Image: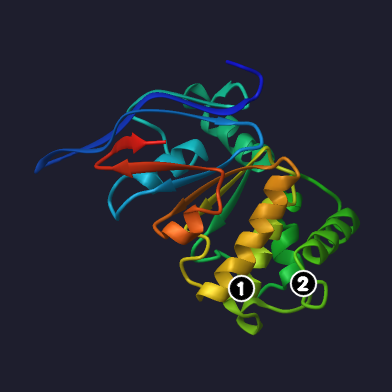
Amino acid sequence: MPDNHTIVVRNVAKLYTTGAGVTHVLREINLTAVRGEFLAIMGPSGSGKSTLLYMIGCLDRPTHGTILLDGIDVCAASEHALAKIRLRKIGFVFQEFNLLPRTSALANVALPLYYAGVGRRERKLAAGLMLRAVGLNDRTAYAPERLSGGEQQRVAIARALINNPAVLLADEPTGNLDSRTGQEIMSIFRRLNATGRTIVMVTHDEAIAREATRIVQVCDGRILSG
């Protein structure tokens, strides 16, 4: 694998077998993302785009095929190893924000550092700096219920970046936001990408997808273009 490839997906398929038969979610997917690329995955509902993102992020496994993340074959890794990979190499941003509701913005951002074994003082300092970087230095003590949707997504981005991951994965990161707030979130993504961060984003919004440097179209579990 070339050194500048952060993500390599080879012949990946995902299927489920039920009493009604076999459902093919993904069919022989081949995809690469170059280090520092901003990749948007587009497709209609049920196309398999989020399933692909979750497999790249080690939250799901393919039925067959290979996924390399920073040179590591994540399909062959144990659950314990996958947990370490998720903690150290991947940052997630979700449509629903997934913040702890009765916990401050600062504590939400610091949570991955707690799991990484970082001391309390270092966690607090790093989380404060990360919130400042996304423009929320005056909201550190606020619980999510006191924050707007855009502010909650900024907290989620800060949390995703706190361990300096190799890859930032985003699943419909603007889906619950109005268009103006969505553009503010995308401006953060553009700044992150300009510093060399690899970003893979799932979206159904063409205007949001155009913010990326490359668009991959997925339909019926297959890559159509990109």
The kind of residue tagged 1 is: Gly
Distance of mark 2 from mark 1, alpha carbons?
11 Å
Say whether residue 127 is left or right of residue 29.
Answer: right
Q: Quadrant of the C terminus?
A: top left
Is disc 1 placed on a helix, strand or loop?
helix
Q: Quadrant of the N terminus?
A: top right
Q: Residue at x 56, y 43 (%)?
A: 213
Q: Residue at x 29, y 55 (%)?
A: 45
Tell me the residue that label 2 is attached to: 136
What is the number of callouts on the image? Answer: 2
The kind of residue tagged 2 is: Leu
Residue 220 on image: x %, y %: 24, 42
Residue 138 on image: x %, y %: 82, 78
Q: Relative to 211, is 6 above or below?
A: above
On the image, which quarter does residue 25 sit in?
top left
On the image, which quarter does residue 80 sit in?
top right
Residue 69 on image: x %, y %: 57, 29
Say whether residue 165 is left or right of residue 204.
Answer: right
In this view, which residue lies farthest toward the top? 1
Residue 92 on image: x %, y %: 58, 51
Q: Relative to 29, is 213 above or below?
A: below
Crowding around mark 2 (Cα neighbors within 10 Å: few <14, some 14 to 19, many 20+) is many
Disc marking residue 100: none
Tell me the residue that label 1 is attached to: 150
